[in-house]
Amino acid sequence: MVKKYVYLFNEGNASMRNLLGGKGANLAEMTNLGIPVPTGFTVTTEACNKYYEDGKIISDEVINQIHESLAKLEDTSGKKFGSDENPLLVSVRSGARASMPGMMDTILNLGLNDKVVETMAKLTNNPRFAYDSYRRFIQMFSDVVMDIEKRLFENKIDELKEKKGVEFDTDLTAEDLKVLVSEFKEIYKKEKGEDFPQDPKVQLIESVTAVFRSWDNPRAIVYRRLNDIPGEWGTAVNVQQMVFGNKGDTSGTGVVFSRNPATGEKLIYGEYLMNAQGEDVVAGIRTPLPISKLKEQDPKIYQQFEGIVNTLENHYRDMQDMEITIEEGKLYFLQTRNGKRTAQAALKIAVDLVEEGMLTKEEAILKVEPKQLDTLLHPAFYTEDLKKAEPIAKGLPASPGAACGKIAFTAEEAKDRAALDEDVVLVRLETSPEDIEGMIAAKGILTVRGGMTSHAAVVARGMGTCCVAGCGTIKVDEVKRTIEVGGKVYTDKDYISIDGTSGNVYGEKIKTVTPEISGHFATFMGWADEIRKLKVRTNADTPKDAQQAAEFGAEGVGLCRTEHMFFAEDRIMAVRQMITSKDEEQRRRALDKILPMQRADFIGIYEALEGKPVTIRLLDPPLHEFLPNNNEDIKSLAKEMGLSFEELKLTVENLHEFNPMMGHRGCRLAVSYPEIAEMQARAIIEAAIEVKTTKGFDVVPEIMIPLVGEIKELKYVKDVIKDTVESVMEEKNVKLDYKIGTMIEIPRAALTADKIAKEAEFFSFGTNDLTQMTFGFSRDDASKFLSDYYDKKIYEQDPFAKLDQTGVGELVKIAVEKGRATRPGIKLGICGEHGGDPSSVEFCHNIGLDYVSCSPFRVPLARLAAAQAQVKNKR
Ligand code: ADP
Ligand code: MG
Ligand code: MG
């Protein structure tokens, strides 16, 4: 049997998404639903993968199947490739399994050549249209297939418009466009050293190959990494008969949503442009009209359009994002997909669809991307400060939120300055797919041109970054690197603030605040909590963070790092004394000073959590991190401690380690200096007793011993803690429950978890260190070389951000199994960065952990990811 690499639209359906890509599967589904879709066929994702397997060569097998399908397309359409009577023109469109807007390329009007263009001109009696289509084709083919700079062509159009004294490309005549075509062909010849290809079949195969190739262009790779899309999925290619929106005033093209993608309001929403083709609407060449205008302009078409929109929404049971084209009064649908939306809109739509009876709560839970919730938890402007501020300009509210930062003029610059911890707002005439990394790095994006469906708007909404688009009153001088508004000039040193909800732009710094969970958000999160089995805790070191996390729904603290408390200015001196002490007695004196401070911290955290469980980790980092590192500081510490400068400097130097990550840290400190663990255990228990007696909260402190690799070291430290705890309870004459457990973060601990569990009452997987030790990558240095690994496709993801399920995950699984075998009820959680990554949360759910713990702002995200994991994999 020969493998089928090409499917006609009427041979596919929506369930074949993996094979046909999202666009192809939906074109097939729409065809089957009887919606007017231009005919065509899809070259599968398997053909793309084969292309890569074969060493970036498109095989004869695939080429033959494309030619066969093309022949069928010619039959059904009654048109023929290259014909001088009735020529067939097609588009070649990419379409991966997951939609990747703007990441890969499309070619329109393929099939045109010097002869066919004449035929088209005669057939349609519209030479302007024919030459407009041809110049577009040459432009797109050159850019996408031949990698000739777009700018070369755009400059020619601008020159011509200027020469003719016209503003829009629609003002150019057939003769103008004819000139443009020959100029474009000259550019092609100059750049490529050969003539523009005249054989449509050559054009077609070259274009299909180019789409395959575009799967691996740098911006697609970045996008995939950001969105967790595996490289092995590949892209499909759709070849589809052209319909023309650029045939004159009864033709047009539009982009529409079945509901408002910014607010979720149940109202058809979108933009269209008459006498235009393809991307014209989103490219910001002319300002498009709101789709409601079409109702006035052509009520009959609008009615048909509205009917199809409703059909599609009911069919897919989700908000749809659609492309339409009208050719001389006849309506076509060119694409539908579940639309990208802002977080606010996603929540409103999910709740509305349940209330409309279209979805169950379980289904609705899957309709919001956990990562999106981020935007809702991110800052809005501080109302008082906002009231005082005067907007200097207003653009379109393209992606909600608030952002404040200094102006960056290029994506490159935004990326570089953000890497140095600077807050920047990226200000551009318009953005293009090459800008993706700068857009990710910027706090907000402001563009001068483009509408609500422009590149900047769509991408910003997808990323949840605040964006104001189409702010035409701002003059950007990209060369001088300034913007000018209302007579005032701003440079890269100046702050601006943008409000993606109102579209307002401010020429000053405005303070931002964090919002709370209410309205649709609260309803939706309530459903997530009803559904999920996995608990969500937070990593919090201060009462303020713990409080914030509790407001976001944290059910306890999974990791409280005590060392962060040591750095405060009023404590560091005592800490340094402790570290540099020459004997136990000196050390104990220093520890006595720290004890009341630690106790006060724990009281604050227990109170913020109102009796929910709190896991406190004993001191973890290597001691020299706390030491003075310049002579001035050493001098003043020496004075304080009654030591000579030389003496102390020597101590400091002796504490230096070659590989501190694997040095004297974690429980090793408690093995050398048990009095540190004693002090911490005392503070933990005294605080719990205090909160119990004064506030009535029954805290069950979970004391966590870090970096254990051997049962005997755990037992040693545990005994120290236990003795202290028992004597504190005796002193105070109060009994309370507590647990002593460990972090599993050294491979040896995972492999001997059956033994470790004899002493440990709980395990918390410290997947940051566990990843570091399993890969042998330093957390602090890996980013320097990981990019080479991404480029060479050895790794696709940062294992510190997304849990490596194959290796590190295997160790976690082993530890879970062995731990439970020894101690069936052992409490299991994860407290690494991964606790806030959706796919890692799903993994934790699947292997049966009790909870994940993540930073406060990721708590809602983890709650949702846990609910989704439950819906997808019931446990
Ligand atoms: P993207 O995924 O970037 O949106 P598309 O493949 O959807 O790329 O195509 C880009 C533009 O070209 C869209 O506006 C689309 O509607 C238009 N287009 C694609 N194929 C055709 C066609 N056969 N006839 C008319 N317009 C088309
Ligand atoms: Mg599209
Ligand atoms: Mg650790």
Image (cartoon, rainbow, N blue to C red):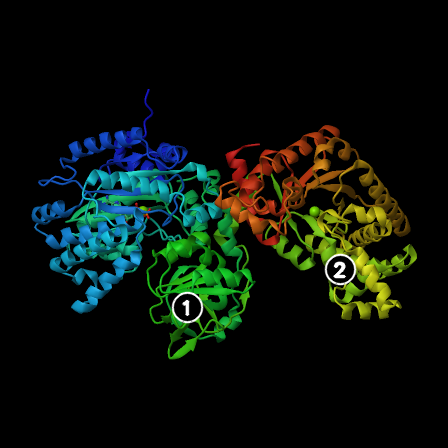
Q: Indicate the secondary structure of the residue bearing disc 2.
A: helix
- Amino acid type indicated by mark 1: Asn
Determine which quarter of the picture holds residue 320: top left
Q: In this view, which residue lies farthest toward the right?
A: 585
Question: Residue 783, how many percent across, how many down?
Answer: 57, 51
Q: Which residue is mark 1?
A: 504
**Residue ID at (33%, 52%):** 267
Mark 2: few, some, or many residues within 10 Å (few <14, many ≥20)? Answer: some
**Residue ID at (73%, 37%):** 749
Q: Indicate the secondary structure of the residue bearing disc 1.
A: strand
Ligand 3 lies under 8 Å from the Cβ of mark 2: no
Is 267 on the left-hand or right-hand side of 499?
A: left
Q: Nearer the viewer, residue 663 or 314?
A: 663
User: In this picture, is 622 found above or below 816?
Assistant: below
**Residue ID at (19%, 51%):** 133
Ligand 1 lies under 8 Å from the Cβ of mark 1: no
Q: From the viewer's perspective, is the residue at label 2 or at label 1 nearer?
A: 2
Q: Which residue is mark 2?
A: 626
Is 813 on the left-hand or right-hand side of 618?
A: left
